[in-house]
Image (cartoon, helix red, strand yellow):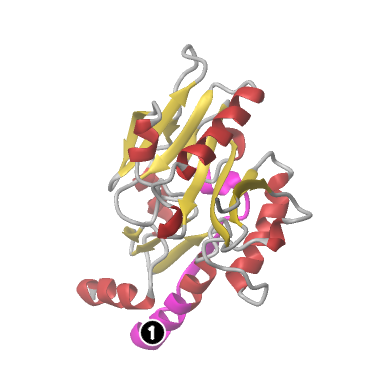
């Protein structure tokens, strides 16, 4: 049987593993994500890699105490999952998603937390809710356009997490031009920002205002979408809630302008 295991990472070994398909320190997104994680480990973040001796890193789970989450939620006392994924179809449907989820639940219990929370949505960018519902998570809150906050409680008496909710109010001060909210939590954001910025200037003579979310509280209290770590607004209206390609960006702008 092929040797597949879950590896705990920290500052000393995180650079040894691929992440979301990236593994090259010359890639800006990968390099920035590594440095971002090194700071987050100090805040109690866990980044565990699903590792195959044959294929290397084929998946991962990342979670952090709610006081330091980069999703736009209030979840103090809960462990919050940022990402859980399996890159290769070869390893899907074999129970590895549940195994990684069990790692998070065990850590939450060990740290006497009230439970585990995760933000999900439809589509391919974020984890869908099926894995969590199957493992006794309940939908506790919703946010536009299709984000859901799922929770599995350990302490049934604890108040549940919730979305911050003041999305339109947050956009009021960004009512002119193209604004990109971004952090290094996702290694894809660096490439997306570079391509979108170049396309905006070359095709539409627009110079975007890039708001860097440098601390977890920025993602919770400044970002105008539930995803927290990346979104784009144009003239005060959200036009994307996750990193997109330059082709997708042009399609959106051509409909607006």
Q: Is residue 42 visible?
A: yes
Whether residue 79 is visible: no
Please say if 145 is above or below 157: below
Depth check, front residue: 92 or 135: 92
Residue 66, horizontal then vertical, whole percent? 57, 34
Side of 131 relative to 62 (left or right): left
Q: Which residue is depicted at the point 39% across and 28% down?
A: 137
> Which quarter of the rendering shows the C terminus?
bottom left
Residue 158 in the image: x percent, y percent?
50, 16
- The single residue placed furthest to the left in the displayed view is 255
Q: What secondary structure is marked by label 1? A: loop
Using the image as rendered, state which of residue 83 and residue 223 is in the foreground.
83
Asked if residue 213 is among those painted magenta in the image, a careful observer would answer yes
At x 67%, y 53%, the residue is 37
Does the segment drawn in magenta span residue 17? no
Q: Position of residue 61 (x, y in %)?
A: 54, 46
Could you classify mark 1 by the number of other residues whose Cα lies within 10 Å: few (under 14), some (14-19), or many (20 or more)?
few
Q: Which residue is mark 1?
A: 205
Residue 16: name its quadrant.
bottom right
Q: Quadrant of residue 246?
A: bottom left
Q: How many numbered tags mark residues here?
A: 1
Please state if 225 lies on the left or on the right of 100 as rendered. Answer: left
Point out the residue furthest to the bottom here: 202
Left or right: where 36 falls relative to 105: right
Q: Which residues are magenta?
A: 195-221
| 196 vs 62: above or below | below
In the rendered image, residue 247, in percent from the top left (x then y), is placed at 32, 78
| Residue pictured at 46% horizontal, 71% vertical | 192
Considering every residue shown, the one lying at the far top of the view is: 157
């Amino acid at each position: 049987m092929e040797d597949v295991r879950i590896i705990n990472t920290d500052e000393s070994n995180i650079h040894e593993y691929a992440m979301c398909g990236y593994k090259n320190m010359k890639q800006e997104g990968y390099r920035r994500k590594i440095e971002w994680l090194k700071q987050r480990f100090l805040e109690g973040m866990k980044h565990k890699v699903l590792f195959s001796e044959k294929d290397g890193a084929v998946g991962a789970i990342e979670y952090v105490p709610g006081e330091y989450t980069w999703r736009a939620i209030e979840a103090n006392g809960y462990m919050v999952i940022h990402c859980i994924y399996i890159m290769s179809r070869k390893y899907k449907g074999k129970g590895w998603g549940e195994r990684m989820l069990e790692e998070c639940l065990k850590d939450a219990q060990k740290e006497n937390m009230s439970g585990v929370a995760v933000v999900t949505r439809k589509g391919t960018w974020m984890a869908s809710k099926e894995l969590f519902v199957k493992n006794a998570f309940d939908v506790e809150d919703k946010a536009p356009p299709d984000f859901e906050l799922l929770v599995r409680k350990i302490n049934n008496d604890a108040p549940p997490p919730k979305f911050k909710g003041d999305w339109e109010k947050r956009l009021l001060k960004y009512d002119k031009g193209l604004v990109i909210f971004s952090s290094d939590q996702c290694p894809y954001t660096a490439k997306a920002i570079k391509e979108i910025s170049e396309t905006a200037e070359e095709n539409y003579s627009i110079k975007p205002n890039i708001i860097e979310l440098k601390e977890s509280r920025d993602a919770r209290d400044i970002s105008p979408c539930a995803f927290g770590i990346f979104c784009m607004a144009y003239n005060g209206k959200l036009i994307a809630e996750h990193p997109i390609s330059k082709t997708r960006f042009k399609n959106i702008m051509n409909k607006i302008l």
